[in-house]
């Protein structure tokens, strides 16, 4: 079945450091891929998305590219801020849209 | 627009008690979902609905029931709560589109503790 595997955390970085959170997926067909962010005490919010191979999603300085050949959707940011401290979830949706599959989440803490 | 709302925000139950969690959305979305979030497990789908009057089982449906009598509401019921159901519960909704991604919109969550 479809699934998502993402990098285990927690991750601790200093402000302005480079961030990469790895995500790989297993799916039949051509899924849509997402990164969601969850701030403390809140629900998940969509961070960025990509719907087909080679698409690059971007938002708030974060980027991820849909790589079909490596079945990956790694999240990157060039310079993290303290306000980026949160839990990040990689997810996929099959084309039917009936179900989403989430990774286990990666906790990021950015220290000043 | 309020988006997706959940009630209650917190609840403590004793083993064997029952309760219903309410999810409401004002975006006229067809699809609604219930997830539970546990440490180290990410989000796991409990039940979902692809339209008013329909429900389907997700990954971890045992011990839960759901109903979607109105398009905007999706209820999650625990008939006899167990400590293993201590978790944070999230509701989400989405609107399918032809050939488009289906972004899910999440509620703020309900923290449930079963003693």
Image (cartoon, rainbow, N blue to C red):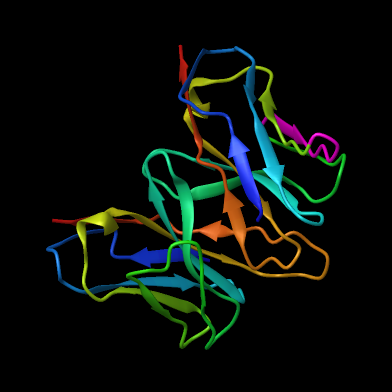
Check residue A89 for magenta coloring: no
SS assignment for the magenta stretch, majority: loop
**Residue B89 screen position, x and y as percent:** 37, 58
Q: Residue at x 59, y 12 (%)?
A: A16
**Residue B90 screen position, x and y as percent:** 42, 58
Q: Residue at x 13, y 56 (%)?
A: B115
Tell me: residue A33, above or below residue B25: above
Residue B55 seen in render: yes
Q: Residue at x 76, y 63 (%)?
A: A95
The image quarter containing residue A109 is: top left
Picture quarter with the N terminus of chain A: bottom right
Check residue A65 for magenta coloring: yes
**Residue B96 screen position, x and y as percent:** 71, 70
The image quarter containing residue A81 is: top right
The stretch in magenta equals A60-70
Q: Is residue A94 left or right of residue B75?
A: right
Is B47 or A55 nearer to us in this picture? B47
Residue B28 seen in render: no
Is A73 or A16 nearer to us in this picture? A73
The image quarter containing residue B110 is: bottom left
Q: Residue at x 69, y 43 (%)?
A: A25
Q: Give the farthest residue toward the front.
A: A1
Q: Is residue B40 left or right of residue B7?
A: right
């Amino acid at each position: 079945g479809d699934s998502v595997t993402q990098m285990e955390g927690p991750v601790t970085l200093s402000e302005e450091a480079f961030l990469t959170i790895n995500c790989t997926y297993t799916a039949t067909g051509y899924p849509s891929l997402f990164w969601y962010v969850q701030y403390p005490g809140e629900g998940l919010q969509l961070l960025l998305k990509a719907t087909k191979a080679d698409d690059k999603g971007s938002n708030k300085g974060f980027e991820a590219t849909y790589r079909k050949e490596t079945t990956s959707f790694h999240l990157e940011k060039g310079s993290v801020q303290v306000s980026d401290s949160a839990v990040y979830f990689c997810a996929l949706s099959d084309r039917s849209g009936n179900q989403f599959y989430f990774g286990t989440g990666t906790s990021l803490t950015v220290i000043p | 627009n309020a988006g997706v709302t959940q009630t209650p925000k917190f609840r403590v139950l004793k083993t064997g008690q029952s309760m219903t969690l309410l999810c409401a959305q004002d975006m006229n979305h067809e699809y609604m979902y219930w997830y539970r979030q546990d440490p180290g497990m990410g989000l796991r789908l409990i039940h979902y609905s692809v339209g008013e009057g329909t429900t389907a089982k997700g990954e971890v449906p045992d011990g839960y029931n759901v109903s979607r009598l109105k398009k905007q509401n999706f209820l999650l019921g625990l008939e006899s709560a167990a400590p293993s159901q201590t978790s944070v519960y999230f509701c989400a909704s989405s609107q399918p589109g032809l050939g488009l991604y289906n972004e899910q919109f999440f509620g703020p969550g309900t923290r449930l503790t079963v003693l």
